[in-house]
Image: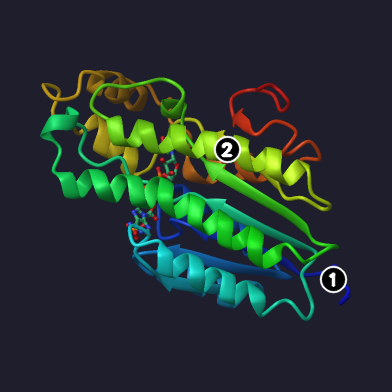
Amino acid sequence: MASAPRSRHLYIVTGSSRGLGAALVAQLLQPGHVVLGMARRFNDALQAQADASGAALTQWPVDLAEPLMPAERLAAWLGEFDAAPPASATLINNAGLVGLPAPLGEVPLAELSQALRAGLEAALLLTSGFLRATGGWAATDRRVMNISSGLGRRAMAGSAAYCAAKAGMDHFSRAVALEQAAQANGARIVSIAPGVIDTEMQAQLRGADATRFPERERFAQLHAQGLLTSPADGASQLLARLQHADFGREPIADIRDPIGKP
Ligand SMILES: NC(=O)c1ccc[n+]([C@@H]2O[C@H](COP(=O)([O-])OP(=O)(O)OC[C@H]3O[C@@H](n4cnc5c(N)ncnc54)[C@H](OP(=O)(O)O)[C@@H]3O)[C@@H](O)[C@H]2O)c1
């Protein structure tokens, strides 16, 4: 068995082009880290930061609403590390989209399909590819962090596809946690609600049509009262949780709860 070089840490982050995902990547760009970002758009600022930081950043411009090819490509890319597996390997399924909030019957079918495929199917397929490709890395600390939402646990009118994607993400994480607990060097997996983050997603919610989205005013008030967390603060809280010794003890978490509380 090849020994794991203790200095190298691998991170895969989806939805890396902006918002929370870009902030996660920015903080992961440290010497010894190999970071792979996926989104439809390339982020030039992150690439410049990587070049200056001594970290390796690769960005794949991929549409995760067509997740089969990216999942197969991820497994093949991870296979390139088989000869010298890293000390740790982490998949952060962060990509998601809320779309324009409206009752289910009024949302174009293509938008619903995209929300479910990019928000749920992609996370599940990427997790499968990641677990398969890294399963033989006996000395590697393997973790999956799924960025869920309180809306996977509480229903909200006007966001049926988003609520369903996040509930599905939570539940497949529970199932995978059971599977991995039964394996030697099983991966740890947590589906975590990140709090309310000041990103384009929040702007979409408070900018929605109130007649089609009853909770619009609540999101407007969160912004007006300065209650949104910055992407940088949100990312550093999530990364602290990811590195915590108790990460994975419970598969469902909320960043606003102390660690260990389901
Ligand atoms: N903001 C909040 O308050 C909040 C609260 C709870 C949960 N969350 C969750 O946190 C995560 C990050 O959200 P955010 O607020 O940072 O959202 P955001 O600013 O809208 O960013 C979403 C990211 O997902 C990527 N993405 C969307 N559709 C994609 C597709 N088809 N293929 C590839 N990438 C795609 C986007 O990149 P491209 O457009 O370049 O493809 C972008 O990088 C999401 O899972 C969200 O559900 C956010």
Q: What residue does disc 1 label? A: 4
Q: Sequence-wise, which precedes: disc 1 or disc 2?
A: 1
Q: Which residue is more in the foreground, 242 or 159?
A: 159
Q: Is residue 45 left or right of residue 132?
A: left
* Mark 2 Cβ and ligand 1 under 8 Å apart: no
Q: Amino acid at mark 2?
A: Ser
Q: What residue does disc 2 label? A: 191
Q: Which residue is more in the foreground, 28 or 162?
A: 162
Q: Which residue is more in the foreground, 78 or 5?
A: 78
Q: Is residue 245 left or right of residue 15?
A: right
Counting from the top left corner in percent of width and height, residue 212 is at: 13, 25
Q: Quadrant of the C terminus?
A: top right
**Numbered mark located on residue 42 in the image:** none
Residue at 70%, 30% in the rendered image: 250
Residue 61 against residue 194 in the figure, above or below: below
Counting from the top left corner in percent of width and height, residue 205 is at: 26, 33
Q: Is residue 26 among what the camera can see?
A: no
Residue at 78%, 43% in the rendered image: 182
Query: What element does badge 2 sit on?
Result: strand
Residue at 48%, 49% in the rendered image: 94
Near mark 1 (Cα within 10 A), the count class, few <14, some 14-19 or many ≥20, is many
Image quarter for residue 100?
top left
Q: Is residue 137 left or right of residue 152?
A: right
Determine the CA span between mark 1 and mark 2: 27 Å
